Image: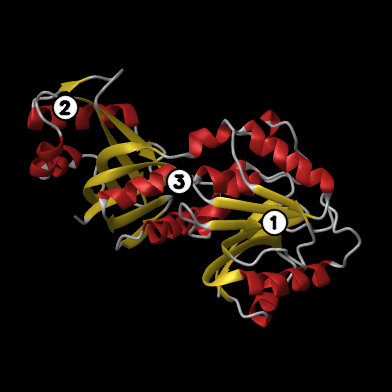
Amino acid sequence: MIQRFFFLLSGENEALSWGECKALLEASGSPFKFSTLKQVLIAETTYDSARFVLERAAMCHYGCLLIAKLPFSLKQISSAISSYESGIASIISSSDSFAVRVRCVKPTFHRIDTLALEKVLGETVRKITGAKVNLENPNKLLIGVLTEGWFLFGLCLGRSARKSLGLRSLRYRPFMTPSSMTPYIARTMVNLSRATPRDIFLDPFCGSGSILIEAALVGCRIIGCDIDPRMVNGAKANLTYYGLNGELTLSDARHLPFSCADRVVTDPPYGRAASTKGIPLKKLLQGFLSSVESVLGKKGWLCMASPSNVDVESYMNMYGFQVIETYHIRVHESLTRKIIVSRK
């Protein structure tokens, strides 16, 4: 059954968070339509698809079954929500306990007293349903989000995978380098590749294994390689630390020793914190793309990171890849990274 849901996204890179959520909706295999507001994506899709997004997303805080979307008016909010009585009563019964939480997407509504608004909404819901308010341990949580003059109100389905990613912080791992990718960006890149469980997933510049770890955790069959034996050994140690298995080999990404892959996701060295072993970056990327072109299946996806001043898109077109999306991430003053998503 198609229903409406909304996802409150993280605010550090709006385009990337929308893109990740959309990619996960595509990967879920269910039909969907979507629209966006600041830091919010609204989707018409199935419950299973919404759960899939929450279980995978790195740039999302939580998702909700949408009860109401309406222009916000502080004076009329109680009567406006009361007009959705049937929707509220269908998901909360008199035997339930509930709490209401309101979030304001900055800078919108930054002067709203959210605690007072939560109290008003809680009283409205209590009158409609007869349910008891329980602020400490409710069995139903209602979320309100104020953004761009709209008020979204819904039943929280749960938090996303984002919190668990913090538990895999680089500092906890047995091996890391200055160029190691954070679990947040690694998971986002895995998601942008539309990876699904049992896909053959390849990272040809695996480094310390950040991308492979996230791919394995979503159920992919992982393969990694690197030209540096120290990186291969370090990636193996990190995978073992998380109880994960995969095939890791010492090899040159320009001459991949593999016959096929469904998804290729990677962060090649740029010659800054990660060495290119004396190979000019242009030759390294062209050699890599030439090799990947013969490995990736006809419906395969390629997602890779690059400095923003390198025209990777032209190289991709040269080797038969269609660029679907490009996102930019400011790393620090001297480096802006871009993530390019393409497919054959």
Callout 1 crowding tier (Cα within 10 Å): few <14, some 14–19, many ≥20: many
Q: Label 1 to label 2, Cα distance in Å?
A: 51 Å
Q: Earlier in the sequence, mark 2 or mark 3?
A: 3
Front position among marks 1 and 2: 1
Q: What residue does disc 3 label?
A: 56
Q: Residue at x 33, y 35 (%)?
A: 102
Q: In this rendering, would 38 be left or right of 316?
A: left
Q: Amino acid at mark 1?
A: Asp
* Quadrant where the N terminus is found in the figure: bottom left
The residue under label 2 is 123
Residue type marked 3:
Arg
Image position of 136 with respect to 141: above or below: above
Colour logic: secondary structure
C-alpha span from label 3 to label 1: 20 Å
Q: Quadrant of residue 103?
A: top left
Q: Secondary structure at mark 3?
A: helix
Q: Is residue 178 visible?
A: no
- The C terminus lies in which quarter of the figure? bottom right
Q: Quadrant of residue 263?
A: bottom right
* Disc 2 from disc 3: Cα separation: 34 Å
* Up/down of 267 relative to 282, above or below: above
